[in-house]
């Protein structure tokens, strides 16, 4: 297997997952800042032009971080980061989807349309006028999510999961691109600090990250 990795939040979620799993994969870096992911030969592996991509030994390419994590969890079920039972897996997927659809996708698009506009305006359709609204929605939904949590556990209960990895990485990214969340929130504030204290959090940062730059 070959992992096509990059300095970006979605690839970082996969790196954090691999660290938590204790898995090592052969890796090749893709320069998303120069748009390498939008050109051949990368597009032959992933025509969507996104990172990361996992290329299997038979040439099959799996894209989307969550899909790759699902695949690797099936091959390496312990420690369980999606869940050891059907109920745990359902709850993990529930919370990951809540975080992605309500919060992190809005952060992502707001970055494309505002802080990252210079980088993305010639690569994808952009809507500068939507950025401020997307940021407001993301912050509102962060408060909404905070209200559904308690102060002791993780998103999907007492077990650390890919839902925590996903939300943590994207909130850390948001902090680095002018979209900080309120770290004083009753539940998400302590949760964020608990996840940040895990060795995999710092270790998953791309070696190309620079102080004061994009965290991914």
Image (cartoon, rainbow, N blue to C red):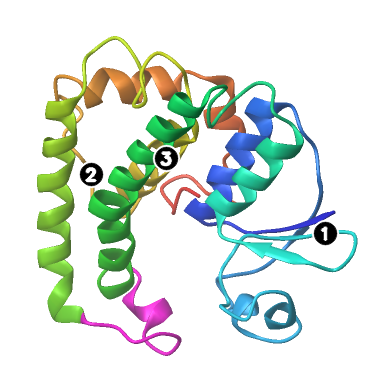
Q: Which residue in the rendered view is the most extreme toward the top?
A: 152
Dot 1 lies on which element?
loop
Q: Is residue 110 above or below residue 45?
A: above
Residue 121: image location, x then y, percent: 36, 85
Q: Earlier in the sequence, mark 3 or mark 2?
A: 3
Marks 1 and 2, how far apart in space? 37 Å
Q: Which mark is residue 56?
A: 1
Q: Please indicate, yes or no, whether residue 161 appears anywhere in the rendered image.
A: yes
Foreground residue, 161 or 42?
161
Q: Which stretch appears magenta?
A: 115-127
Q: Residues within 10 Å of mark 1 (few under 14, many from 20)?
A: few
Q: Is residue 126 a member of the stretch shown in magenta?
A: yes
Q: Is residue 193 above or below residue 119?
A: above
Q: Which residue in the rendered view is the most extreme toward the right?
A: 57
Which residue position holds label 3?
93
Q: Residues within 10 Å of mark 2 (few under 14, many from 20)?
A: some
Q: Which residue in the rendered view is the most extreme toward the front?
A: 86
Residue at image location 46% in from the left, 17% down from the top: 159
Give the label, 3 or 1, closer to the camera: 3
Foreground residue, 176 or 38?
38
Tell me: 74 left or right of 8. Answer: right
Residue at image location 25% in from the left, 60% down from the top: 106
CB under 8 Å between discs 3 and 1: no
Which residue position holds label 2?
180
Dot 3 lies on which element?
helix
Marks 3 and 1, how far apart in space? 24 Å
Q: Residues within 10 Å of mark 3 (few under 14, many from 20)?
A: some
């Amino acid at each position: 297997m070959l992992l096509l990795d990059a300095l970006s939040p979605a690839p970082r979620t996969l790196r954090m997952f691999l660290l938590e799993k204790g898995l090592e994969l052969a890796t090749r870096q893709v320069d998303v800042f120069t748009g390498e992911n939008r050109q051949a030969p990368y597009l032959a592996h992933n025509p969507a032009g996104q990172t990361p991509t996992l290329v299997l030994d038979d040439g099959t390419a799996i894209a989307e971080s969550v899909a790759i994590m699902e695949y690797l969890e099936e091959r390496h079920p312990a420690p369980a980061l999606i869940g050891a039972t059907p109920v745990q897996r359902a709850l993990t997927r529930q919370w990951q989807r809540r975080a992605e659809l309500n919060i992190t996708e809005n952060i992502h698009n707001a970055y494309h349309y505002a802080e990252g506009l210079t980088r993305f305006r010639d690569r994808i359709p952009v809507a500068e006028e939507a950025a401020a609204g997307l940021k407001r929605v993301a912050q509102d939904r962060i408060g909404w999510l905070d209200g559904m949590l308690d102060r002791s556990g993780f998103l999907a209960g007492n077990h650390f999961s890919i839902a925590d990895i996903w939300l943590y990485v994207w909130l850390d990214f948001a902090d680095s691109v002018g979209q900080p969340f309120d770290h004083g929130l009753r539940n998400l504030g302590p949760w964020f600090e608990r996840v940040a204290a895990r060795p995999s959090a710092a270790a998953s940062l791309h070696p190309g990250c620079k102080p004061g730059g994009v965290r991914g």
